[in-house]
Amino acid sequence: MYDDARLIERNVATMDTKISAKGVDVFYADTHAIKDVNVEIEDKTVTAFIGPSGCGKSTFLRCINRMNDTIDICRVTGDILLDGEDINDKRVDPVQLRAKVGMVFQKPNPFPKSIYDNIAYGPRIHGLAKNKAELDDIVEKSLRRGAIWDEVKDRLDAPGTGLSGGQQQRLCIARAVATEPEVLLMDEPCSALDPIATGQVEELIDELRLNFSVVIVTHSMQQAARVSQKTAFFHLGSLVEYGDTGQIFTNPVDPRTESYITGRIG
Amino acid sequence: MTDATAAAAPTNPAKSSLLAVNDRIRRRNAAEARFKYYGLAAIIVGLLSLVILLTAILSNGIPAFQRTVVQLEVTVTPEEYEAAEGTLFKTKEYEALFVGALSATLENAGIDADLSSDALERLVGKVGNNLRAFYRENEDQLGQPVTFEVPAASRIDRYFKGTLAVENITAENRFIQPADVDVAEAMMEAGLMATVFDWNFITGVDTGVDNPGGAGIGASVLGSFLMMFVVLVLALPIGVAASIYLEEFAPKNRFTDLIEVNISNLAAVPSIVFGILGLAVFIQFMHLPQSAPLVGGLVLTLMTLPTIIIATRASLKAVPPSIRDAALGVGASKMQAVFHHVLPLAAPGILTGTIIGLAQALGETAPLLLIGMVGFVARYPETFMGGLEGPNSALPAQIYNWVSRSDAVFTEKAWGGIIILLVFLLTMNIIAILLRRRFERRW
Amino acid sequence: MASAGGDRRNLHSLPNYYGYHAALWAFVPAFVLLCLWLIAQPLLIGASLSANVPAGALGDGMNMSLLMSDVSRVAGGLDTAVAGGAISAADATSPALTMDSLRATLTAAGVPIGSDVGDVVLRLAQQYRASSAVGYGLMTAAVAILAIGGLGWAWTRTNAAFRARNIVERAVLGLLIAAASIAILTTIGIIFSLIFNTVEFFRLYPASEFFFLLEWAPSFSGRGGASSLGVLPLLWGTLYISLVALAVAVPVGLLSAIYLSEYASPTVRSVAKPLLEILAGIPTIVYGLFALLTVGPFLVSFFGEGGYLGVTWMGGGTAVMTAGLVMGIMLIPFVSSLSDDIINAVPQAMRDGSLGLGATQSETIRQVVLPAALPGIVGAILLAASRAIGETMIVVLGAGAAARLSLNPFEAMTTITAKIVSPLTGDSDFASPEALVAFALGMTLFVITLGLNVFALYIVRKYREQYE
């Protein structure tokens, strides 16, 4: 544990911290789902959360943009700072927070609207475009960033639900980046996709790193190794180890991390 | 730190603090709150309607359960009895006896009033029959003082219930005059009049328009119960049998599809269409008696079947297949598995559905009007079969019948009838809820 | 048992199945015969009696069915009188009995007979009773013989190898199928009873007038004369009232459903939802009374003469508005619980997607959830509309009796259902177009609501499949 703390300190000294969590606990009714998690997530970096199923990585991810607010029985304690501001502060509007911290979900969930409207939804509600031309611009830019523009540019009026799974997920990513967030949270974005679509999305994540701080939850250690610069390993609700991806995968400090990586747990 | 991030994020030139709420957010939050209030307002409108409806029912209906009575000790001598029995208008004679006694009592009590028989008759209504019936039954009471409790006139009754418009009480009014009210008040004080619980309303039978105060709902309640009996006896077995077939045995073919489509459509067919069916098939074609609870029951059975079938199928579906497999695994036939294992487990759900179906049938009016279930029933049927086949009314049809008469007393009775109807429905629903709670099972 | 050598295990089926088998054979054929007989006998006797009616017995304004109903009434009255001891069994069959002497007795037995019923009817009634008695005697004998025969047949077949269970089970399955077919029979019954009488109506009254005449004015005095029976004013009244009802029920019901499913805490939900559903469990007669006696006068006190608003829009308590408002209240829980189901069927992922983008909850509901649920909600509204169109008691009591084509919602209008009830209630015969029109109206109603229902159920089913 002390080693972890040192690791974090070293990172903070060298990089910009975007999100910093201190002593975060999450309870679902009586279940203690997240136990005292401390982590500093850097800007312009892909950070991967790995760990066995039910270890709390998704729950923690949802804390970062307060999606857990929508679950009645869920209670979050501790501080999560975004650019030094506590996101659980009473004055913070979760709506404003979520505009800054976008989220992509496990299952592609396009709205039952046209592709254009799917992308334009966020900019419209946040008032990012002054006129139709600007909105068109944003839509095109977002679809390009989502690496899906070429596939859909001729059928922007077609329903988003008619796309293939991989296209849907890229559409959802494009939809998330359209609101110009600062942080992009991805909850197992590839678990419902086939290998080719997964490859496309992973490529996309790597590009997104240039503009956003990306946090990705994943089952697949290979994926974490491929796309992330930093990796955090969760086990039974606790953050076991956090560090550079290379270090975690080649030279884990904690024996539990080693067990997981070598396939002995999870 | 914040500055550094901002500088490093060229895509977000206008970085804002999370803590500062901008105008747009404020506007959107206001819209959010407004929308939420719309929803809340809708709920309140719904609940308010319920409250108003229940208040209207209770405030208008409760007086129907009370009646104002005149309590008077009367002594009729055997001679007077003989004389009265000898005349042509016997009840008129008894009425005179009663009014005479009342006049004497009032004089003794020192109530200063117009004691003419006309005035007193306006107070007590038609009492002759009560007296005559009593003495014909109990001739040994002749010559003894007997305390009678007879209904006061309906206008007096309504005066005490506060449902009579005071401006109608004028000297020109043939039924009630200002002086009568004073006498009635005085009698109330002297204990000669009282407001009592009206058992007759619950147990009695319908009356003609000349005696609205004496109308009771008992016979039509019986009519409703007879219909419910028919519905229960027919709809439950048929509904359960149909559900078992559809859920457990039916192959997927066009015949079963046809049945399914029929059931879901029948559930949504307006109830009055079932009335037309009953009229045409049971009465016109099969010549079953009109106004009979048997026919009413048959019509309501057809109407209730879809409800029962849908509920039964749901509870059969809720029994896990493992139970069926277990029974089949020990060598039971499919039929045995269903009847010995699945059906008992689904029974509480079936029962709940049946009770809810019955409650629905109990409140149904329109089809009953078409098959003439508005019979005027002056007496209770003597035998069970006679009750099923003879003309009768039903609770809701009786209420409708009363509303369409002009006398305000009947309107009051109609509200009272609604209270009784709702009490029955409430009881049935509570039983259904209790059953569900008691036997609820999670697999 | 004996054939199995006294060992139960040698039997193919459990012993009680042999019993069931025998009972089945004893009862089912006998019961079927009983039913057929009971249906056939009155028809046969009726036919033979009709043949015996003397030519002069049918005077003016009398037709065969009326005469026949008198006959059966007198016969029934005689039965009651004999059972009650008011008249001896011998007297009841004696040819010396006259209608005049009988009338008082029958009235005492609870069967008042009109004065125009003569001795001819009495003779026919006596004949009817005699044939009935013979018929019932024959029936009892035939049923008993069949029952015993069935039992005997089952008995001879009972032996150890006999597969009683399979036969019994096949019979039970047959019963189950028969029960399930009742739904089809009911539909057939509805369709036939509507078609027969509607065809009868159109024979007496031109169909083109029924469908296109803008006037509804049945004349009950002059038979078959100057009645105008156009369905359009009734259809307009029906649609207008339903429209008012939906204008109340849809916003209130939909917003309630949204609030309950998206905002309300579990406590509020668990209290408010059942309370709202009470409204659905209240019988329509109660709503009718509420409309007539509470809402109507209340509206008059605002919109009527001398009302608070100083306008004279409303002539009386019964009006489109009265019935529409009350019907709207009745439909609130219907709309809200259907919409609730439908809104809950929208996957949570879709809400998360929108919330994750920083949409407020109301933006999520209005721009994502509702559009996604739209087909289902439209289906729910159509079902509610069909319910409103078919509703009877509220309009019978609350809407008034005058058929008119008007836009004023405070005027009394009448509906299809109300005009089905009025000619068929009471003792009218079913021969005049004024009475038969009810069946044509019923047909119209049935076709409209069936169309709406089928369409709505189709939409709702398609919608559910989309998210399954």
Image (cartoon, coloured by chain):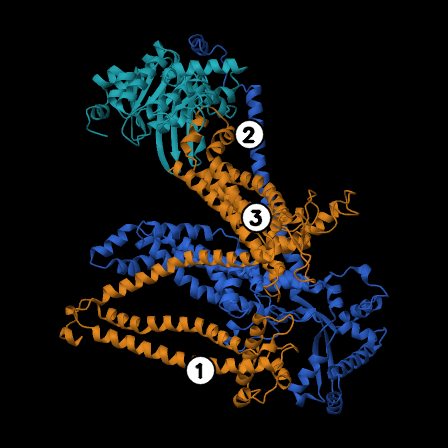
Chain colours: A cyan, B blue, C orange
Q: Which residue is mark 1?
A: C134
Across and down, in percent, residue A260 comes to: 22, 26
Q: Which residue is mark 3?
A: C388
Classify 10 Å Cα crowding around label 2: few (below 14), some (14-19), many (20 and above).
some
Say what amino acid the circle numbered 1 marks: Val
Classify 10 Å Cα crowding around label 3: few (below 14), some (14-19), many (20 and above).
many
Quadrant hosting residue C41? bottom left
Quadrant hosting residue C27? bottom left
| Chain of the residue on which disc 1 is drawn | C
The quarter of the image holding the C terminus of chain C is top left
Q: Is residue B118 above or below residue C414?
A: below
Across and down, in percent, residue C399 comes to: 66, 51
Quadrant hosting residue B328? bottom left
Say what amino acid the circle numbered 3 marks: Ala
Q: CA distance from mark 2 to mark 3?
A: 33 Å
Say whether residue B325 is left or right of residue C387.
left
> Same chain, marks 2 and 3?
no
Q: Is residue A213 above or below residue B351?
A: above
Across and down, in percent, residue B286 comes to: 49, 68
Say whether residue A167 is left or right of residue C233.
left
| Chain of the residue on which disc 3 is drawn | C
Q: Is residue B233 above or below residue C241?
A: below
Q: CA distance from mark 2 to mark 1?
A: 81 Å
Pick whichever, B198 or C429, lies toward us: C429
> Same chain, marks 3 and 1?
yes
> Of the residues under marks 3 and 1, which one precedes in the sequence?
1
Please tell me whether mark 2 or mark 3 is closer to you in this view: 3
Q: Is residue B223 above or below residue A181?
A: below
How many numbered discs sit on the rendered protein? 3
Q: Which residue is mark 2?
A: B32
